[in-house]
Amino acid sequence: MILQADAATVRYPGAAEPAVLGVDLRLGPGELVALVGPNGCGKTSLVHGLLGLVPLSGGVVTLDQRPIAHWSRKELAQRVALVPQREDTPFSWRVEDMVGFGRYARLGPLSPMTDHDRRAVDQALARCDATAFRRRTVETLSGGEWQRVRIARALAQEPALLVLDEPTASLDLGHEMELFELVAELVKDGLSALVVTHHLNLAARYAGRMLLLDRGRVAAVGTPAQVMRAELLSSIFRWPVGVVALEGAPHVVPERRDAGPGR
Amino acid sequence: MKPIAGLALLALAACVVGLAVGATPVSLRALVAALASSDAPAADIVRDIRLPRVLLAFTVGGCLGVTGAALQALVRNPLADPYLLGISGGAGVAAVVAIALGLDGVWGIPAAAFVGGLGAVALVYRLSTVAGRRLDPHVLVLAGVVVSAFTGALISAVLTLSPAEQLRNVFLWLLGGFSGASWRTLVVFSVYAGLPLLALFAAARSLDLLSLGTESAQSLGLDAARSRRLIYLASSLLTAASVAVCGVVGFVGLVAPHVLRSLLGPAHRRLLPAVFLGSGGFLVLADAVARTVVRPIELPVGVVTALVGVPLFAMLLRRALR
């Protein structure tokens, strides 16, 4: 088990309700787990709690059997890489600089990059198909290229676990598929991944397990077939949906309110 | 030629100009002679007056520039500058109070200025932390303006309440500039500024990461809260030391970082040493202009830096709000 949460609870100071309450999670090597749920259900808060970015107000999270609070940020960054939901910078970084930041946790404050560091950056760029634009500055990139660069930076960390927070939020269909295929390939090569996404159907096709959150609590956890149940999803997303099987994976189809053909 | 070597040559040229011009111009040959031998005709003026002055202006300029560059990455806003964020103002108030109370030793003013600078940082930070814990870059600049206005008002109050004898001292200091520079002030400044300057150079990689925002910086392995505290502390110390020896001089932290970032890229390991040389040379030249443009009257050097800095600031502001 790489990452394990037992009754993890996150409560922000001054908030009436906890953002995350009593969440259990198991993530083993080479597993792809999808974290899904409505807007504001606590997905990002849970990710932050799992990675020690916010303190837990209850429960335990362990990485490699060691409580997350006992890890220094540098140690943690060598084991887990996060691609945050939003990110911007006021400066014109080159793509290769940006990916090079993935080596920060392995470098001293003044020591230059070694050949090994440079190789890790080159490989990460190649893996994410970003070598061609490595010398461009980040503000010139398209949305899809920018996401690939950020995943390349995460790979340059040489992590065991990759955490992606809504990686396809602003991507079109083709780029979205490319990204899920990339993550699936990385998982096939032994990386573990936790992917926060609103795309239930892609989550069901790519993830081995899904965790459905609702108002900070686990509403369902298990294989896509166990989680993707029409009545459960309808009540949580407050919209009537049907579930159909497609290529062996359950697919959600939202219904029109008047349930008739287009007028 | 490497960019940094080119900058070093430019900075050296600025220093030569700074040594040569003034109320009594010194030719290049006389300058070399004066630096070589203490018996040369211009030796007194070059060695005892101009050399410490030029070196002080250079180091103060370098420190303000590096502070500006560091603050810009820290608050993720290319408009940040120790003057615009109100740190200089806070340091100024405390220094003025110290002078008015007669506590104006060479070591006392920097210490007072440091306390005032830190207070201003805390105030600006509090004012600009809106919507939970988010630091809005535009609000930050506004908060800096508000704190600067407030410190200006406090300085007026101190001036009004000071007895006539102290009033002159306070006023002379407020005008700012390097006319009081001596080997002694250079030593005092170096003692106060040395460690914090090294701390900022050593934090170059952390500054790279901080410019990406807290969440990214932390997930890449940076202890963002600790790193921020260290950089604020070092920046306040450097600003305070600068304010103590030359008064409140604005915009030095804006000009060189902006120009050099567009030439060399934003990576701080390359940028900060270049900014030190560039800002140092810039302030030496600004001081030379201040000494000569309406000879024999000496303009406050802050007037010259503002003439260059304000148009640049206006341009950056337009770009930031677009």
Image: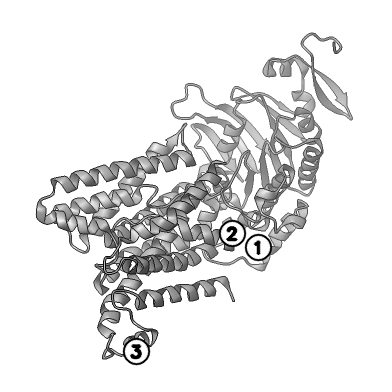
Q: Are labels 1 and 2 on one chain?
A: yes
Distance from label 1 to label 3 (Cα)? 51 Å
* Secondary structure type for disc 3: helix
When the figure is inspected, residue B286 is found, relative to residue A262, above or below; the finding is below
Q: Is residue B110 left or right of residue A240?
A: left
Q: Are marks 1 and 2 in contact (CB under 8 Å)?
A: yes
Residue B268 in sight in this render: no
Say which amino acid is labelled 2: Arg
Q: Nearer the viewer, mark 2 or mark 3?
A: 3
Residue B77 appears at what percent x and percent y? 50, 47
Q: CA distance from mark 2 to mark 3?
A: 52 Å
Instruction: Name the one closer to the observer, B281 or A142.
Output: B281
Please rate how many residues cluster around mark 2, counting C-alpha atoms within 10 Å: few if below 14, some from 14 to 19, many from 20: some
Residue B57 lies in what quarter of the image? bottom left
Residue placed under numbered mark 2 in the picture: A106
Q: On screen, B44 above or below B168?
A: below
Q: Is residue A20 among what the camera can see?
A: yes
Disc 2 is placed on an element classified as helix
Check the picture and name the quadrant holding the C terminus of chain B: top right
Q: Establish if A126 lies above or below B34.
A: above
Count of marks placed on residues:
3
Q: Earlier in the sequence, mark 1 or mark 2?
A: 2
Mark number for residue B33?
3
User: Which chain is home to disc 1?
Assistant: A
Q: Secondary structure at mark 1?
A: helix
Q: Amino acid at mark 1?
A: Asp
Colour convention: one colour
Say which residue appears at 57% left-offset and 33% top-offset.
A45
Give the chain letter at badge 2.
Answer: A
- Near-viewer residue (B135 or B285): B285
Residue A16 point in image, percent of width and height: 47, 21
